[in-house]
Amino acid sequence: MFRGQELTRPKNRSILFTVIVVIAVVLGSSMSPVLGYLSGITGLLAIIFASILDSFWPRGNKPENSVVFALFWGVMLGGVLPMIVRVFLEGGLEAVYQMLVA
């Protein structure tokens, strides 16, 4: 990110696709370890494609690719956020800190 490049709001289509991917990842990873593994692989591929296409977040001069944006943020939010919330509910901030530093 360079100076002078303002962040903009993602398109509504990107946000809708992201919500769909989050729901699919949370449900899939809780139903089967194989689906959790596939969502992890999808997350790794989304990181690669988002890096190549520079679609992590839209900027004023370049809109995001809706599919890559949705896959990246959907897998990150659907895979990582529930784990952090679960660790927090079980052990509080100390457990989250230990998870991050260990």
Image (tube, helix red, strand yellow):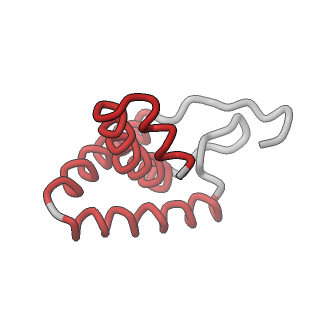
Q: Residue at x 39, y 52 (%)?
A: 75
Q: In which quadrant will I find the N terminus? A: top right
How far across and how far down the image is residue 94, in percent?
46, 33
How far across and how far down the image is residue 4, in percent?
84, 32
Question: Which residue appears farthest toward the right when viewing the image?
Answer: 3
Viewer-closest of 78 and 12: 78
Viewer-closest of 15 and 78: 78
How far across and how far down the image is residue 7, in percent?
67, 32
Residue 12's quadrant in the figure? top left
Residue 79 shown left or right of residue 23 in the figure: right
Q: Residue at x 14, y 57 (%)?
A: 31
Q: Residue at x 32, y 41 (%)?
A: 82
Name above or below for residue 42 compared with residue 56: below
Q: Residue at x 25, y 48 (%)?
A: 26
Residue 96 shown left or right of residue 58 in the figure: left
How far across and how far down the image is residue 73, in percent?
46, 46
